[in-house]
Image (cartoon, rainbow, N blue to C red):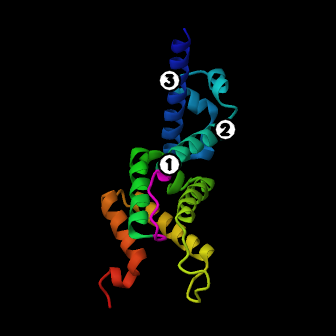
């Protein structure tokens, strides 16, 4: 009996989230009502409130679950002994793009549509920065040429998110592995050298 109940709850939640995702794309988050979600999911309003307190609660749940999945995938990326090596950046970027491609419509709604949800980008960028900080290993403690760790992390995190948003906006113009390889080469060699300019 419990299994049947659990499956029913799972199906209802999936139906609500699917309806929510479709409506965000069609109308934007602000314009959606609970009744819109209930109608699209073919449930009544009371059923919605059995699972979520309100619309912001549903949004937070969807964002947190998606970002939790992303974080789990990124955590598994190996850390190189050299900070921000080509292999680390390439692996993290490819992992992120592959995750996005499996959840494309929701990421598009959260990151690039007119009604995008700004906290989502900040939370996603923090996951990326966290991974880069994990891989941080300064060259020499007293090196005069060493740049600020915070500056470097901020630069890489912003560049990373810029590439992700470009990839989404452009409808995946290159495969994830090519984007990842080219991004890591730009970071490793500088944009001019990576472009073949002396």
Residue 68 falls inside the magenta stretch: no
* Label 2: element kind: helix
Give x and y (percent) for residue 137.
54, 71
Give x and y (percent) for residue 43.
56, 22
Toward the top, the furthest residue is 1
Position of 139 with respect to 57 (left or right) is left
Badge number at residue 11 = 3
* Label 1: element kind: helix
Neighbor class of circle 1 (other Cα within 10 Å; few <14, some 14-19, many 20+) is: many
- Bounds of the magenta segment: 74-84
Quarter that holds the N terminus: top right
Q: CA distance from mark 2 to mark 3?
A: 18 Å
Residue 108 seen anywhere in this rendered image of the structure? no
Q: Which of these two is toward me, 148 or 42?
A: 148
Residue under numbered circle 1? 70
Circles 2, 3 touching at the beta carbon (< 8 Å): no
Q: Which residue shows up at 59% across the image and 89% down it?
A: 144
């Amino acid at each position: 009996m419990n299994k049947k109940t659990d499956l029913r709850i799972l199906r209802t939640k999936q139906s609500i989230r699917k309806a929510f995702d479709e409506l965000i794309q069609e109308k934007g988050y602000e314009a959606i009502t609970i009744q819109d979600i209930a109608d699209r999911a073919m449930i009544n309003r009371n059923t919605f409130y059995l699972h979520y307190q309100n619309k912001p609660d549903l949004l937070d749940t969807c964002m947190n679950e998606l970002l939790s999945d992303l974080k789990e995938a990124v955590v598994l990326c190996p850390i190189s002994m050299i900070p921000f090596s080509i292999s680390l950046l390439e692996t993290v970027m490819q992992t992120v793009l592959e995750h996005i491609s499996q959840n494309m419509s929701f990421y598009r709604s959260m990151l690039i549509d007119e009604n995008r949800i700004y906290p989502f980008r900040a939370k996603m960028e923090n996951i990326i920065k966290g991974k880069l900080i994990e891989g941080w290993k300064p060259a020499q403690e007293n090196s005069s040429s060493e740049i600020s760790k915070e500056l470097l992390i901020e630069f890489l995190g912003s560049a990373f998110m810029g590439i992700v948003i470009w990839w989404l906006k452009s409808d995946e113009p290159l495969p994830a592995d090519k984007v990842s390889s080219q991004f890591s080469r730009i970071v490793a060699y500088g944009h001019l050298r990576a472009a073949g300019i002396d």
